[in-house]
Image (spheres, grey):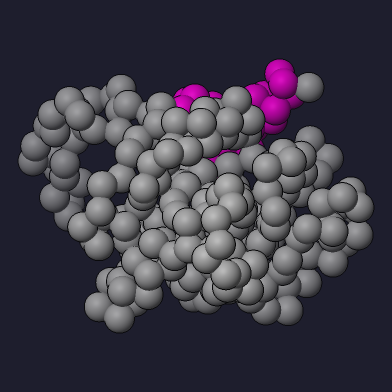
Amino acid sequence: MRANAYRPPCHFLVLPAAGSGQRMGADRPKQYLELLGKPVLQHTLERLGSLNRFERVVLVLTAGDPWWPPIEAALPAALKAKLLVVSGGSQRCISVQNGLSALQEVAADADWVLVHDVVRPCVGLGDVERLLQELRDDPVGGLLATPVRETLKRTDTDGVVIQTVDRAGLWSAATPQMFRYRLLLDALIKAAANNRVVTDEAEAVEAAGLPVRLVPGGADNLKITWPQDLALAELILGAAL
């Protein structure tokens, strides 16, 4: 890690992409499905990699991933120059921790790390800039999120409604999630030591007893999960071209 001499905080991007995407029922992980002529992962990499903010972009893949080499060859030279590829784990939180560990020689404790779902290729760059601006002086960090609009139902194991949940104050968490480097790494290490599998970075930071801020983001920051999401992502990206 760098010495503690003061300098403005740097920004790093971590993209966990070691998941299998089984719910898509496809012949390959969902990050490699084609979207407007390119794999989903390539859209996300090129979209966020176009921002000059990031000192390094860390892509976390399954070891020996056979789908990655042709995408890497097609990336712009400027992006490849700051790209670091590391191996992930069986859970997202392990993959993110591996990505953070790979930055230990270049990241200072107070630097910012943005972790983004690689299957969110439609994230608005304006939303990312808003996140950066609103959290720039925060001691902890936060995430993009959208207020819950639908009526929420809780069911039993048979699918029968047992409760209508008050949606007041409820938000749908999205990414990027942006936290101070050392704080986030320590939170993930602590969660792992407690055998707690966290579903996002914010949960690890919350579990460490630290305040996490929400920054409103666009509803078009779609996470590709189901087959029909690809068609919707095409509409969103196509409208932006």
- The residue lying toward the viewer, choosing from 5 and 240, is 5
Tell me if 23 is positioned left or right of 230 in this view. Answer: left
- With respect to residue 27, does 222 lie above or below? above
Image: magenta residue range = 217-240
Question: Residue 154: within the magenta?
Answer: no
Where is residue 148 drawn, in percent x and y?
30, 28
- Please identify the quarter of the rendering in which residue 17 is found: bottom right
Residue 93 visible somewhere in the drawing: no
- With respect to residue 127, does 7 lie above or below? below
Where is residue 28 drawn, in percent x and y?
68, 61
Residue occupying the far top of the picture: 239
- The residue lying toward the viewer, choosing from 5 and 196, is 5
- Please identify the quarter of the rendering in which residue 14 is found: bottom right
Residue drawn at (31%, 57%) of the image: 205
Residue 32 visible somewhere in the drawing: yes
Q: How many marks?
A: 0
Residue drawn at (46%, 47%) of the image: 177
The quarter of the picture where the N terminus appears is bottom right
Tell me if 240 is positioned left or right of 139 in this view. Answer: right
Residue occupying the far front of the picture: 5
- The residue lying toward the viewer, choosing from 165 and 195, is 195
Residue occupying the far left of the picture: 162
Question: Residue 219: within the magenta?
Answer: yes
Residue drawn at (17%, 25%) of the image: 168
- With respect to residue 69, does 140 lie above or below? above
Where is residue 193 drawn, in percent x and y?
30, 81
Where is residue 206 drawn, in percent x and y?
26, 55
The quarter of the picture where the C terminus appears is top right
Residue drawn at (40%, 31%) of the image: 215
